[in-house]
């Protein structure tokens, strides 16, 4: 497929993959930056390695009948970077227990719930008593409440028609 890429880019037929990568390094870096939203360093950036592999993959799989090479390469690079970032995000989460096992001293207050739910429970119980004074329960309200805006509007119309009779 290198031949198709060279034809699409109007590059000398004797150009090898490494020359093609060197020539398009700014394009590769820009494609990576567009996905990551940050500057890409050429010295020690993992994303650059992933982007270079994506560019090489684009060279190997390119079909000149399906559009321009650089558009295709940008898609492949972006896809590889997104997959890489998803994988990295999965591995960066540590639980508090893991941090304690590694020797990090964490205060006990972080292991306890921040908020005392007793106030919320008390408010719910007061509301339950207030509703029951009207002869209803929470379940009654859920069962009788309109599920969609259209239902609510229909009920309002029916009420107005009955009221005006």
Image (cartoon, rainbow, N blue to C red):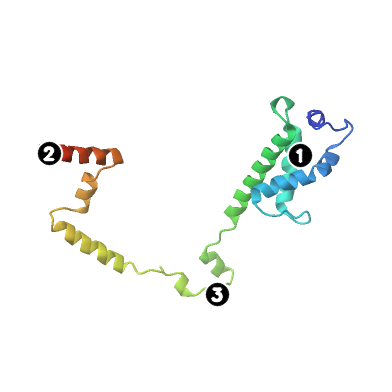
61 or 41, which is in the foreground? 41
Task: Mark 1: give few (<14), some (14-19) or many (20+) Cα within 10 Å.
Answer: many
- Give the quadrant of residue 143: top left
Residue at 55% from the left image edge and 65% from the top image edge: 98
Visible in this render: residue 31?
yes
* Disc 2 crowd, CA 10 A, few/some/many (<14, 14-19, 20+): few
Q: Is residue 140 above or below residue 96?
A: above
Labels 3, 1: front one:
1
What secondary structure is found at the residue carrying circle 2? helix
Q: Earlier in the sequence, mark 3 or mark 1?
A: 1
139 left or right of 73 in image: left
User: Disc 2 or disc 3, which is closer to the eye?
Assistant: 2
Residue 148 makes an appearance in the image: no
**Disc 2 marks which residue?**
164
Of residues 60 and 98, the one nearer the viewer is 60
Pick the quarter of the image with the C terminus.
top left
Q: Which residue is mark 3?
A: 105
Q: Residue at x 86, y 40 (%)?
A: 19
The answer to which image quadrant residue 135 occupies is: bottom left
Q: Sequence-wise, which precedes: disc 2 or disc 1?
A: 1
Categorize mark 3 by other alpha carbons within 10 Å: few (<14), some (14-19), many (20+): few
Query: Residue 14: horizontal and vertical position, in percent?
Result: 89, 32
3D distance between C-alphas at marks 2 and 1: 75 Å
Q: Is 74 positioned to the left or the right of 96 in the image?
A: right
The residue that label 1 is drawn on is 56
Badge 3 element: loop
- Residue 137: x, y in percent? 18, 53
Q: Secondary structure at mark 1?
A: helix
The quarter of the displayed image where residue 121 is located:
bottom left
> Is disc 2 in contact with disc 1, using a CB cutoff of under 8 Å?
no
């Amino acid at each position: 497929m290198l031949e198709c890429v060279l034809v699409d880019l109007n590059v000398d037929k004797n150009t090898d993959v490494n020359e093609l990568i060197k020539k398009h390094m700014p394009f590769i870096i820009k494609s990576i930056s567009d996905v990551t939203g940050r500057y890409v360093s050429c010295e020690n950036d993992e994303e650059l390695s992933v982007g270079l592999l994506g560019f090489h993959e684009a060279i190997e799989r390119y079909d000149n009948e399906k559009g321009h090479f650089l558009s295709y390469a940008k898609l492949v690079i972006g896809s590889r970077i997104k997959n890489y970032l998803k994988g990295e995000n999965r591995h960066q989460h540590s639980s508090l227990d893991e941090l304690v096992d590694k020797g990090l001293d964490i205060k006990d207050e972080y292991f306890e719930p921040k908020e005392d739910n007793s106030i919320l429970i008390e408010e719910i119980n007061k509301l339950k008593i207030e509703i029951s004074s009207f002869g209803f329960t929470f379940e009654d309200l859920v069962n009788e409440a309109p599920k969609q805006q259209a239902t609510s509007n229909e009920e309002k119309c029916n009420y107005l028609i009955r009221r005006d009779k």
